[in-house]
């Protein structure tokens, strides 16, 4: 949305494509019960328009999906963006025409479009992944995918409901559906750590204050490691006494949100520190969940806390104290198949009326490997990423001139506020376009050396991080045959911005190669 707006304001002719029936991306598709953002709404919103910042009023600290979508549509309408989008349209091929220095795009509507620049704003979490379980298409009940949720209300009263998946999505669904379902069976493989969200309604006084201070708040977010307003301490875990640590952890638990991660500086680097925090959270699970067997099964044990995306909940663990909610521990019993009437494991059968899949995404790279993106010399992104994603700043790829990815897989993507990253990336691309125009340049492409240099930085930083110690979508571990590895930039958003700024110095000469020529704006 920002790219469409920005490039239009610069005078370019824009054509945007969107597979969904409207604006919103993840918030258009994920209409499942309980869907809610896990960053403060005032932080998870565009900063490029001071007018919109003043005109829009968030009602909750962590907005639910309907409000997020309403905001997105408000922005779309306010900036008159919809007219640039062709909705319900999937791009099926994008190919670089070297002779004419144009990207040629084909869509599933049978159209061909040509443009000197192509921006892939395809998102890190846009290709949902079904579980590899036999018989999925045999189920005669109602099958729902969290990331393709129907637009009409689904009711669970008196129904036997199964949920597969206990990541952020599954957790949000379970705590909500558990309220009304006749019986709820949660099929859990790896338990997640989840912390209290402690969501609140925003008071008019708070909103007025935020609106008055938006410029400063945005600047603070841009200068932070997470691209947001969450405090990040410089205090190392073992630099304070055991009693102080306990007090700080209790405070973080009481304050809610992702406060705990920022309470100490080294939780993603120091294994011992991480282990103590993990034990603290396991203790909390034990305090809430009454049945000791269920409590034990809900405690994550074999990976560092925060190495999987931390989840926020409002009543997840409490939900398991309800008599209608049952945890099926897939470490103790194996799913054999989905049948016409439910789920069969090696311990028995679960009759279900509704089955919900919250089984995640082909994250980071999935959107660009799902169709042919063909660069110079006929080489596709799929071929380029055979051993894992490669790129420069998450923004460009060697071999793909004038093609840009926003929140790409070699930037901070999933590790910082995605709205701040998107704005940064679009601004960076826009400045490059201006540079090209001013200098009579038709194509820009990152050099192989600059790309390799960037991937070395990514890899060196990544090796220090505990993120490597959990099997997650961050690493591609959830998709069969996907190359395993951490290509995300783990150095923090502020540092990422420094690298983005450094790339511009010296007329981009250290990192990019250009071809002379003229790009027509319209
Ligand atoms: P996810 O974190 O990848 O979780 C997928 C879940 O499905 C995992 O528990 C996984 O278990 C399970 N699963 C997959 N295949 C399975 C199988 N065959 N049998 C049993 N279980 C299976 O996906 P997600 O929950 O959709 O979250 C993805 C990301 O979206 C999050 O990390 C977060 O960044 C974002 N998100 C954010 C919010 C929010 O803002 N509040 C909400 C939802 C999502 P294993 O781990 O054992 O494979």
Image (cartoon, helix red, strand yellow):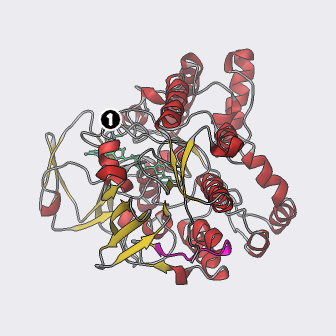
Viewer-proximal residue among 102 and 269 = 102
For the point 59% across and 79% down, which residue is it? 81
**In the image shown, does 64 or 381 lie closer to the viewer?**
381
Say what secondary structure mark 1 lies in.
loop
Decide which of 208, 450 is in the foreground and name it.
450
Judge whether residue 501 can be spotted in this image: no
Could one spot residue 90 in this view of the protein?
A: yes
| Magenta range | 9-16
Q: Give the image location of residue 322, x and y in percent.
A: 42, 52
Q: Which residue in the protein does label 1 denote?
A: 387
- Ligand 1 closer than 8 Å to label 1 CB: no
Q: Judge whether 282 appears above or below 504 on screen.
A: above
Vertically, is 84 above or below 173?
below
Q: Position of residue 433 (x, y in %)?
A: 62, 60
Instruction: Point out residue 468 in the picture as x, y percentages from the top left corner.
Output: 44, 28
Q: Residues within 10 Å of mark 1 (few under 14, many from 20)?
A: few
Which quadrant holds residue 301?
top left
* Residue for point 33% across, 73% down: 107
Residue at image coords 79%, 47% = 220
- Left or right: 287, with 261 as reference point: left
Left or right of 288, for residue 202:
right
């Amino acid at each position: 949305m920002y790219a469409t707006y920005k490039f239009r304001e610069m005078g370019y002719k824009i054509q945007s494509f969107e597979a969904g029936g409207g604006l919103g991306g993840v918030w258009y598709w994920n209409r499942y019960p309980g869907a809610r953002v896990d960053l403060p709404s005032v932080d998870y919103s565009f900063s490029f328009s001071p007018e919109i910042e003043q005109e829009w009023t968030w009602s909750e600290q962590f907005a639910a999906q309907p409000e997020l979508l309403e905001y997105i549509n408000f922005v779309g309408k306010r900036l008159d963006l919809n007219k640039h989008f062709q909705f319900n349209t999937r791009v099926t091929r994008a190919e670089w025409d070297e002779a004419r220095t144009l990207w040629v795009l084909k869509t599933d509507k049978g159209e061909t479009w040509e443009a000197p620049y192509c921006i892939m704003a395809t998102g890190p979490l846009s290709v949902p992944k079904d579980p590899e379980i036999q018989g999925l298409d045999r189920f005669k009940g109602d099958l729902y995918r969290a990331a393709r949720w129907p637009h009409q209300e689904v009711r669970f009263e008196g129904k036997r409901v199964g949920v597969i998946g206990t990541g952020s999505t599954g957790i949000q669904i379970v705590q909500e559906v558990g309220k009304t379902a006749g019986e709820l069976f949660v099929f859990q493989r790896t338990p997640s750590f989840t912390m209290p969200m402690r969501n609140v309604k925003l008071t008019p006084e708070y909103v007025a204050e935020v609106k008055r201070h938006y410029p400063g708040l945005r600047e603070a977010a841009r200068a932070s490691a997470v691209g947001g307003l969450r405090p990040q301490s410089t205090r190392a875990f073992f630099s304070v006494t055991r009693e102080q640590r306990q007090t700080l952890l209790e405070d973080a638990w009481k304050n809610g949100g992702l406060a705990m991660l920022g309470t100490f500086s080294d939780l993603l680097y120091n294994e011992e520190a991480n282990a103590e925090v993990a034990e603290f959270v396991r203790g909390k699970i034990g305090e809430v969940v009454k049945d000791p067997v269920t409590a034990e099964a809900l405690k994550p044990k074999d990976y560092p806390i925060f190495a999987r995306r931390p989840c926020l909940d409002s009543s997840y663990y409490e939900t398991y104290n309800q008599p209608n909610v049952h945890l099926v521990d897939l470490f103790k019993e194996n799913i054999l198949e989905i049948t016409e009437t439910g789920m069969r494991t090696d311990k028995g059968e679960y009759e279900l009326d509704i089955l919900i899949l919250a089984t995640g995404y082909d994250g980071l790279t999935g959107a660009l490997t799902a169709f042919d993106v063909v660069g110079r010399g006929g080489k596709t992104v799929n071929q380029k990423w055979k051993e894992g994603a490669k790129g420069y700043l998450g923004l460009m790829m060697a071999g793909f001139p004038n093609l840009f990815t926003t929140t790409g897989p070699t930037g901070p993507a999933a590790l910082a506020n995605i709205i701040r990253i998107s704005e940064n990336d679009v601004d960076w691309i826009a400045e490059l376009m201006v540079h090209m125009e001013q200098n009579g340049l038709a194509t820009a492409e990152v050099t192989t050396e600059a790309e390799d240099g960037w991937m070395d930085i990514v890899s060196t930083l990544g090796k220090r991080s505990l993120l490597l110690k959990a099997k997650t979508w961050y690493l591609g571990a959830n998709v069969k045959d996907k190359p395993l590895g951490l290509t995300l930039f783990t150095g923090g958003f502020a540092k990422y911005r420094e690298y983005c700024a450094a790339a511009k110095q010296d007329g981009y000469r250290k990192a990019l190669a250009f071809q002379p020529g003229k790009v027509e704006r319209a």
